[in-house]
Each structure stands twice: as structure tokens, then as C-alpha cells.
Amino acid sequence: MSASADRGRGRGRGLGSWRLRVFLGARVLSTLGDQVLQFAVPLIIYTVTGSVSLAGLAFLIEWLPRLSSLPLAGVLSDRFGGRRVYATSDSVRAAACLLTVLALARWPGHTFGLTAALMALCAFCYAQTFIALESTIPQLVPKEDLAKAQGVLQIINSGSGIFGPALGGLMLFWVSPTQLLWVSGVAFAVGACGVSAIRGLGARPGVTGDTAEVSADVRRSVVGDLRVGIRSLAGTPILLSLVGLTMVANLMVGLALATGAPLTIGHFHQRDTVFATLQITVGVFSIVTLLSMTWLLRRVSIYRVGVLSFLVSAAGAAIIGVAPLFPLYVLGYGLCIGMTGLFNVFIRVERLHWIAAAERGRVISLIVLLNQSTLPLAGGLVALAGGRLPVQLLFLAVAVLAWPAYALLLRPLRTQAMTARPADPADPAVPVAVGEVGRCVLDAQAAPVRRVAAPRRR
């Protein structure tokens, strides 16, 4: 009986268990649906309205709920269980996508309002699914397999960041941008059904006793964790420098993402299929740069890779700002977005040297919030200035900002950064997350720590 029970547990938990496979399959569909949605909505808004400002405002609306809902996401997962929150959030996103398609057909004159509402709701639900994911995985695999499971999840996140926009771009050859919402809706719906089918994950942590008492304990925990993170971050100057650099890098990337469709279609008068091809090309370039990491590390330190990628991204933003022709814009767009994956690896490897393991989740959650804050700022800048100034001037301004950021924050790290020091042969090799591309937004996946291996990383 005992041996049979052990075999049952082995089949139920572990990398080969059917429950984990179903969950990972649902995660693939969920992340693909999210990436197709993020590709389609700015395109829908610009092709219908022709307004750069509205495209920027949509980007702002997309990112604000992602940031503001992060603290609530942990509370909901703790109270109701990660599986239930995940399935509910994806079900809401599926229904929202499908209803928005029907509403756009019925009220085509309200395209911006309908799609902006869709993005706000889906952005809120995205934060819920991601935090729910973190609380569900430990229930699906034993502790010794967690690192491998996290590696598989990272591959899924990174691959979806490339293949989601690629799928959306290819489908534009046969369908309109609005019809891409059907693709996202179906992906969310099937993913939600898959997660709902997983049962027997155990009792929800902390959901015993009086509900009001539990709610008060959760609120105190959230506030306490936030205070710990603030104290640790404020007391470590090198972490503040890394946050400042990442905020500047995300501002450049945010501007590129928010204005990609308006500049390609409106300013340079290209077709929407050309914009799709541009997204695919930049995604492939991002993967190539990350695959070059092993070759680079044989010749230079991770710190120098970070310096090079930051400066090249800034140069790409400057090229976008002055580009008179579309091919030159493509070059700048590719450099600005494609090189940030390498910079992402640098900041994630470096900051783990400076965060105590017991405080890692709390501190990195706060860092993620700060890092992402310039993404909605980029959308807000485009929304405010897009109708008054040439959008390319914003890129020139941010490119100019990047140089003092390098001089004041990045260059001084050379004497302090652990990644700038020669590797100690006695230490384990520096783990590098080759797959961490996402949409090339730094820390865009509001994850606590995306594990890559052992002592030195993210």
C-alpha cells in the first residue's frame, strides 16, 4: 500500500506528472494570448484612429493596472489559492476579448474606449495570473525539481514573447487586426479550462479561522513586506543604481513599443504587414543576441556586456530620433529593443549578489515595481506630446538622458560590481538566463526571482 501510494505521488508530482504538463500547456496558451493581445491592440487603435497620442495613451492604460495590482495579486492567491485565481483570471480575459470583438462590430466608433478598457482589464488579470503561477508551481513539483520547472517556465515566457507577436504578424496576412482578439480569447479560454481541470493541490495556505482575522493578517503582511523591501533597497546604493539604469532602459524600450505602429504605418507610410515583419525580425535578433552570451563571456565580463548593451540601446534610440528613412528606423528600433536582453542578464546577475536570500522576494518585488514604472510613463509622454511634437524628438530626449545615466550610475559600478571582477575558479560558473527575452522589457514579467541556476544571477 505504501509503495503504491509513493508511486501515486510520483505520478502526481514531478516534471513528468500529467498535472504539471497540463499546467505548462495552459501557461503556453495564456502567454501566447497575452502577447498576441499586446501586439494587436496598439495596431487596432492606430489603424482606426490614426492618432499617435491615443496609441501612447493605450500603452499607459495597459501598464498602470499591471503595476497597481501587484500587491493585491499576492493577497488573492493567499486567500483563494493560486489555481483558482489563475483559472478565474484567464476566464475573465477570455470573456473580455470575445465580448470586445462583438462590441467593436456593433459600435465601431468607440474603438479606443473599448480596446483601452479591454487592455486595462487584461493587464489587471495578467498580474493575478503571474503571482498565482508562483504559488501554484511548488504544489505541482517537489522541491528538488523547482529549479528545472522554473527553467521550463522561463523558456515558455521568453518563447511566447517572440512567437506571440510573430503569430499575430503572420495572421495579419489573412485577417484584420481586430480579429486577432479572437485568437487571444480562445487561447485564454482553453488555458483556463486546463488549469481548472487540475485538482488536489491541497488546502490554501492561511485560509483557516475567522475571515476578517485572516484578511487583517494578510494586510499586515503586505505592508510589512513592503517596508522590509524599502529599507533593504534604500540601504544598498548599488541596487538603487541598477534600478535607475533599468528605469532609463525601460523608458527607451517603452517609447519604442508605444510608437512602433504609429511610426511604421503613419510616419514612414508602411503597411501593417511590414510592421508585423519588423516585430518578428526584432524578436529573432533578440534571441541571437542572447545566444551570443556564452561567446561574449569567454572574452569579457558580464559587467562589460551590460555596459555595451546599454550604450548600444541608447544609440538605437538616438538613431530612431534622427532617422529620415524607414531602413534607418528599422536599424534603430532593432538596436534599442534587441540589445536590452543582454542588459537584463547583467542587472539580474549583479543584484543577486546584494540581496539577502531571506529578503529576496520582497526586495525584488519592489525593484520590479520601480523598474516597470517608466513603461506607463513612456505611454504618458507619447499621449501628451504625440499630437504637439514630432514623436522622434522624444527618442532624442531619452537618448540624451541615457548618457548622464551611464556616467553617473553605470560607469562608477565598475569598481563595486561583483560582475566586473575576474571569476574565481573555485566558484560555480555564473548562471546566465539565455532565454529571458519576453518582449525585451526589463522585468516586464513581474516575477519575484526568475531562477537560472545557483549562487550568482538575476
Image (cartoon, rainbow, N blue to C red):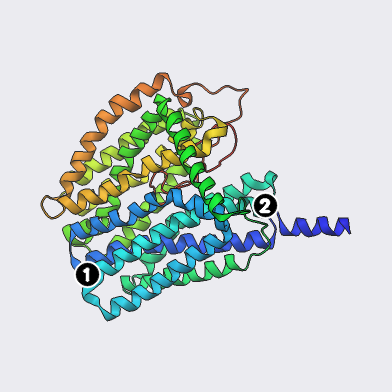
Kindly check if marks 1 and 2 are in contact, taking CB atoms under 8 A apart as contact.
Answer: no
Q: Nearer the viewer, mark 1 or mark 2?
A: 2
Give the residue at mark 2. 141
The residue that appears at 44% across and 29% down in the rendered structure is: 231
- Indicate the quadrant containing the N terminus: top left, top right, bottom left or bottom right: bottom right
> Going 51% across and 32% down the picture, which residue do you hit?
352
The furthest residue to the bottom:
106
**Which disc is residue 48 wearing?**
1
Please state which amino acid type lies under the numbered disc 2: Val
Tell me which amino acid carries mark 1: Val
- Up the image or down, 333 lies above or below 457; here it is below
Q: Can residue 193 be seen by looking at this rendering?
A: yes
Can you give x and y, in whole percent of width and height, for residue 175 in the image?
Answer: 34, 75
Relative height, residue 173 to residue 139 (above, below): below
Badge 2 element: loop
Residue 327 locus on image (x, y percent): 23, 52
Task: Give left or right: position of 403 versus 22.
Answer: left
Measured in 3D between alpha carbons, the distance from the residue under mark 1 to the one under mark 2, in whole angstroms, is: 46 Å
Q: Position of residue 87 (x, y in %)?
A: 53, 64
Direction from residue 156 to residue 406 in the image, left or right? left
Residue at horizontal 49 percent and vertical 27 percent from the top = 354
Compared with residue 440, is residue 432 higher up or lower down, i.e. above or below?
Answer: above
